[in-house]
Image (cartoon, rainbow, N blue to C red):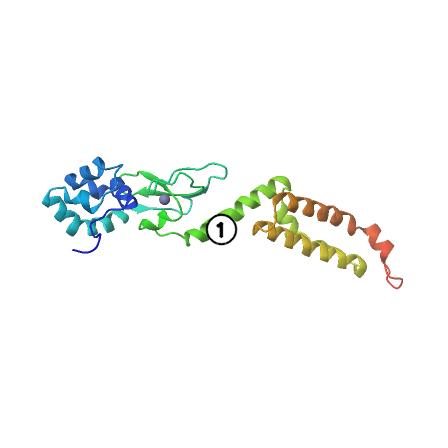
Amino acid sequence: MGLNKREITLKQKNLLLHSKITQQHPEFYNFLKENKNNDITEELINQTSLELQDFIEYILPNIKIKAKEEWTAEEEDFKDLEQNRTTCSLCDNPNVRYVFYVTNTFTKEKLKVGSTCITHFGVELAADPQILIENMKRSTRLRKLNKLIPGIQQKIDNWLSKLKKYKIIIPENLSQPYQANAKEARETYNKFLDNQLPLKEAIIRLKHLLRKKEGEITIKNIIKNKPKECYI
Ligand SMILES: [Zn+2]
């Protein structure tokens, strides 16, 4: 017999208890239910009927695979709970912030799991769980920023297009600082989304840059700063 071959981990036990296929094997299902709060060790398995021991050794490996395949997850079945936390249905970790929801194809039961435990199901995700979490973190940060500076993403995207709206040549002493500010705003925005800059600091910097932007390029300023040979 292989080393610890018959051991059933906590995660396996929880997954099996929620899967339909397990219920087709009542003796085993009841054994899991009775030991919901116990570790299922080799020693414990040795105390069960020989029939159950055979089942665990020879049939269970296949059941484990089938159980995983009962579950699906959609892209929208993933959430950032922000300040809240939930408990993982598989490993009982009570500190899950980024939660994946998996649904049983047969029973429609939904389980909440963390990014490690999602990999224990046979579900296909759009990307690696860690990448999904990174993307989720960015969109949470963008939402916070947008609340304080509405339309910030569009404002930054359109920053430089304002220069093109003028049918005249903008003097370099006006256009250069304007472009430099646009670049700084873009960098500040990206740094914040990459979590390299705290929200408060990003807001102060961006508001300052936006204020400068509003005052910089106006017809009045262009006339004031026009080179002598330029007529508008
Ligand atoms: Zn877990």
Say if 205 sits above or below 36 in the image: below
Badge 1 crowding class, 10 Å Cα cut-off, few under 14, some 14 to 19, many 20 or more, is few
Query: Position of 141 compared to 209: left or right?
Result: left
Say if 232 sits above or below 64 in the image: below
Q: Which residue is mark 1?
A: 134
Query: Position of 121 compared to 46: left or right?
Result: right
**Can you name the residue that lies furthest to the left here?**
50
Q: Quadrant of residue 114?
A: top left
Say if 135 sits above or below 230 in the image: above
Query: Where's residue 162, x and y in %?
Result: 71, 53
Query: Where's residue 132, x and y in %?
Result: 45, 50
Whether residue 181 is visible: yes
Between 203 and 221, the one lying in front of the other is 203
Query: Where's residue 34, x and y in %?
Result: 21, 35
**Can you name the residue that lies furthest to the right here?**
228
Quarter holding ligand 1: top left
Locate the C terminus and report the quarter of the image it occupies. bottom right
**Can you name the residue that lies furthest to the bottom here?**
229
Query: Position of 70 compared to 24: left or right?
Result: right
Between 224 and 210, the one lying in front of the other is 210
The residue positioned 10% from the left and 45% from the top of the image is 51
The residue positioned 23% from the left and 49% from the top of the image is 64
Query: Where's residue 119, x and y in %?
Result: 35, 51
